[in-house]
Image: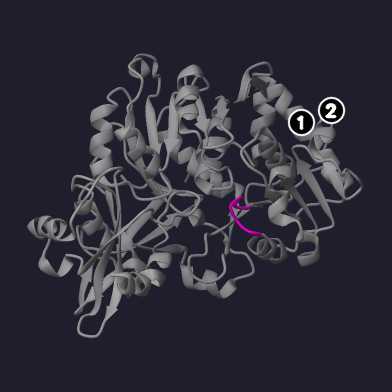
Amino acid sequence: MIKYDYNNFYEILEKNAKQYPKKTAYFIDDRKITWGRVKKKVDTFARTLEFLGVKKGDKVPIFVGNSIEYIVALLGIQKLGAVAVPINTFLKEEEVAYIVNDVEATLMVASAKLAGSIKNIRDKTNIKKIIWEGDWEKVDADNISFSEILSNFESHEVSELPKIDDLAVIIYTSGTTGKPKGAMLSYKNFFSNIYGVNELIKLNHKDRFIAYLPMFHSFTLTVNILLPMFYAAPVVIIRSIMPFSNIIKQTLLKRVTIFTGVPDVYSALSRAKLPFYFHWFNKVRFYISGAAALPGEVLERFSAKFKKGKLLEGYGLSETSPVVAVNRPELQKPYSVGPAIPGVEVKIVNDELMEVPVGEPGEIIVKGDNVMQGYYKREDATAETIINGWLLTGDIGKVDEDGYIYILDRKKDLIISKGVNIYPREIEEICLKYDGVKECAVVGMKDEQSGEIPVAFIELEDGAEIKEGELKRFLKQHLANYKVPKHIYFVEELPKNATGKVLKRVLRDKIDEYINKN
């Protein structure tokens, strides 16, 4: 049983502001912001929200890119006991409106740069007031300037701060099938992640993190915002992932020690021609990979190139706040996402939810303080996903004798051909070993004789040319014949979501289109 020292995130902010009032909390552009100043901004913002009628339990959407304002909004909302609802900034108006209506919000925080994506949001929702981050000219009672709010610091006290089991955030899943669902995450859910990681990786207030992945994502929220705050460690905020050279530059200039990324980033770094001085000045001790599966080929290339720091692959999902497992610095096993973090249990089960023997594949289920409270207003979906306290992840995996977890595939991505299970990730790993293949995605296609057959979509390296027959011959050397894709399609770019996950649903929908082309 983990003993938690805090009830909410504001208590950590208070501690940091008292203990390190003049220590830099955030670097952004050419500015530095201290913990003392961050607390004043949060207090002022919370006071304004209170004045605007926000109260405990209210849901407040945040449609803002990476910025100090995002963090101030998040903490200000939570100080009042209200619930922050981060929204994917890549969504279109209809998608944003669905989430806003689902949480019945009347006030939201939005970026002026994204105004074009929500220009009719008031007509489609019950939103009455918007607090605009960035340059907004039409300021009035219903369109409030974030910068004006923060221009006048106000002290602010609340009668009661949130409790540890209170709802802190609702994060909407990407909704690859049907409408997205809101995962309800409490303060305890997040603290479970923070304390679990704290036992594994010894971090301190001298570490420096970099946040360039979108802050609306659960991985960034936990690992790049809340975890550094727990240690009072500074964060270098990058507004955009492009140009990527700026991320490299800021990593060096700001002496970043903890670097987080998605597999696409590590794949690019492992192939990039970096300046000769990079490895001299690079201070990174841990590279952490999450949000999607890290191909073994990328891990091998990256580890050979970056010898000073360790690349630790983790595993998680929004419903688990999000970390479930992470490789250990002292023992990292290739192709594994490591054992469960302290305080979290993992089992591999069959369709009857009975645990299978070590080494056998099955569905990964998770239990612990990191498991969400449920899906917002979706009792049926919650009951199907959480059974006797165990979260059914929908991921297929196995564990070895040391408890290290290996992800084989998503349950819904599993291909069943003539009654035999085919795991697309296994095929993808082999494809990535072939010279010239940049990325690969394998999906199932309906087939009258076999039920399903594997089909591969390949994105090539710049300038590479590959013949389908030659690639198939290579695959046959490493895979059983029934696993070799029956069709291989070369595409300019694989469709992905904001965090770099390949959208296999889109590829399945396009199979007929590719068949007709070829």
| Rendering coords of residue 499 (x, y %) | 47, 48
Question: Residue 357 in magenta?
Answer: no
Which residue occupies 16% across, 56% down? 471
Q: Is 145 situated left or right of 95 in this image?
A: right
Magenta range is 87-92
Q: Residues within 10 Å of mark 1 (few under 14, many from 20)?
A: many
* Visible residue check, residue 350: no
Number of numbered labels in the structure image: 2
* Visible residue check, residue 401: yes
Specify the quadrant of the image occupied by residue 502. bottom left
Residue assigned mark 1 = 41
Q: Nearer the viewer, residue 85 or 237?
A: 237
Q: Is residue 310 above or below residue 388?
A: above
| Rendering coords of residue 423 (x, y %) | 25, 64
| Rendering coords of residue 238 (x, y %) | 56, 32
Question: Residue 90 in magenta?
Answer: yes
Q: Is residue 489 above or below residue 199?
A: below
Q: Is residue 66 above or below residue 434?
A: above
Q: Is 510 situated left or right of 105 in this image?
A: left
Q: Is 343 situated left or right of 40 in this image?
A: left
Q: Residues within 10 Å of mark 2 (few under 14, many from 20)?
A: some
Label located before the other in sequence (2 or 1): 1
Label pair 2/1, CB-CB below 8 angstroms:
yes
Query: Which image quadrant: the C terminus?
Result: bottom left
Question: Amino acid under label 1?
Answer: Lys
Residue assigned mark 2 = 153
Main SS class of the magenta portion in the image: loop
Q: Nearer the viewer, residue 336 or 245?
A: 245
